[in-house]
Image (spheres, helix red, strand yellow):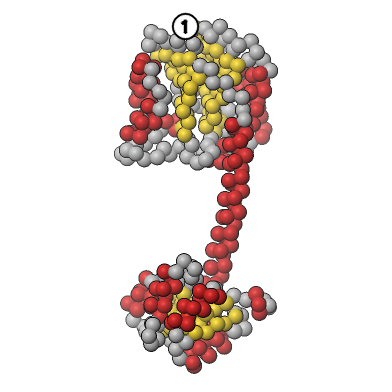
Amino acid sequence: MIPANQRPTVLVVDDTPVNLSLLSNLLKEDYRIKVANNGIKALELAASSLPDLVLLDIMMPVMDGYEVCRRLKADPITCDIPVIFITAKVESEDEVQGLSLGAVDYITKPIVPVILKARVSTHIALRQARHELERRNIILNEEKALLEDIVTRMHSSTPFDGRNVRYIHKSLEKTGGDIVLSACRPDGAQHVLVGDFSGHGLTAALAGPLVSYIFYSLTIGGYNLNHILAEINRTLCRQLPIQMYMATSALELSPERNRIKIWNYGVPPVICLSTEHEMVKVESSDLPLGVRESHNDFEPHKQLDASSGTHIFQYSDGITESMSPEQEEFGLTRLDELVMRIFQNKLPLEVIWEELKLHCDGQLLTDDAVMVETSTG
C-alpha cells in the first residue's frame, strides 16, 4: 500500500455534507482527500495545495461548478488539474458544456462506487504519465542542447580553408546534416567536399565531425582525394548504422589550379562554368558513401582542364527539391539558369535564398540546404 503522505490528492467539492462524506469515504483508502463546500473555497484550496484531481459538483449556490471549472482552467497554476464533474444533471447538453470548459469526465448521480474509483484512477494515472513525459522531455531537450553545442563547437573548430571558396548553408535545426569542407594539401592542391547526410537535425549532424577529422587530417597529410574518400566510406560503413549514409560531391584542384577532378556520389549534378560561359555537369555516378564498404576504386568521375576563372558549384538536394505551394520542385533547370546568372553577373550566392523564398511563397525549406562555389582563380 502507498504511504498516506505519498498518495495522490483529490479535492472534493460539493455543497451537500452527505455527498462530501460519501465521496470522501469511497476514496480515502487510496487518496488524500481535501474537501470544499463552495466554489470560492475550492479555488483557494486548489491554488494552495494543487490537488491531482478535482471532483466537482455543478449545482452549488453563489458559484456553480461550471464557473469553478472555468476559473481553474483560466489560472496558469491550476489549469492542468483534471476536473471530473459529478452531478444529477443527465441532459447531454449539460455534459457537452462541462467538457467544453475543460473537464476530463462527467459522472452522473447516483454514484456507482466502482465507476467512480475507476475514472478517478484513470485520470490521475493519465496526469502522472503526462507529468513524467514532460519531465523526460525536459531532460531530453537539455541533453539535445548539450549535444548540439558539442557538435557545433566541433564543426567550428575545423581548419576550413576559404581561399577561392564561398558558400551558403541553411539547416532546419540548430545542427544539420549538410557539411562543407575545404583544405589544401602541402603541395598546394585544394580539396573541397560537400556532404549531405541522410535525415536532418542532430541525428544527421553527429557524423559530421568524424568526416571532417578524416578529411582534414589526411589532406594536410598530403593524401590524394580518392584515398580520402575511400577512407571516409570505409569508416562510415563500419561506424554508422545502416540507415545513415552521406551523399557526397568532391573536387580536387591541382596545385597549378588548371586541372579539376570531380566525384559525385548521390548528390545533384556538379556544375562547372568556364570563362566562355560553357556549362559542364557531372552527374552522380555511384551510391552515397557509407552504403557499402566494397565501393569502386574511387577514381574521379570527371577530369577537366580549367582556365583561370572557371567556377565549380556543388550543392545538396535541399535546394532543388524545395517545393512551391503547388508542390512543384525548384528543380535543376531553374537552378542551372540561376547559377549562370550568378556567375555572369558576379552576384552573391544569397540570391539563391531570395529565389527559393519566391518559389516557395515564403515557406520554410523542408530539408537542410547548401551551395558551394569554388573558383580556379
Q: Residue at x 53, y 90 (%)?
A: 21
Q: Residue at x 49, y 93 (%)?
A: 18
Residue 176 picture location, percent across and down: 53, 37
Residue 38 picture location, percent across and down: 44, 85
Residue 34 picture location, percent across and down: 55, 82
Disc 1 is placed on an element classified as: loop
Task: From the viewer's perspective, tell me whether residue 138 is left or right of residue 269.
Answer: right
To which residue does mark 1 refer? 307
Q: How many marks?
A: 1
Task: From the viewer's perspective, tell me whether residue 107 is left or right of residue 242.
Answer: left
Label 1: how many Cα within 10 Å (few below 14, some 14–19, many 20+):
some
Query: Between 266 and 312, which is closer to the camera in this rendering?
Result: 312
Q: Quadrant of residue 75?
A: bottom left
Residue 144 visible, this orientation: yes
Residue 172 picture location, percent across and down: 47, 39
Q: Residue at x 46, y 17 (%)?
A: 312
**Quadrant where the N terminus lies?**
bottom right
Tag 1: amino acid: Ser
Q: Residue at x 65, y 26 (%)?
A: 214
Task: From the viewer's perspective, tell me whether residue 2 is left or right of residue 318.
Answer: right
Q: Is residue 337 above or below residue 368?
A: above
Residue 230 visible, this orientation: no
Q: Is residue 108 above or below residue 51?
A: below
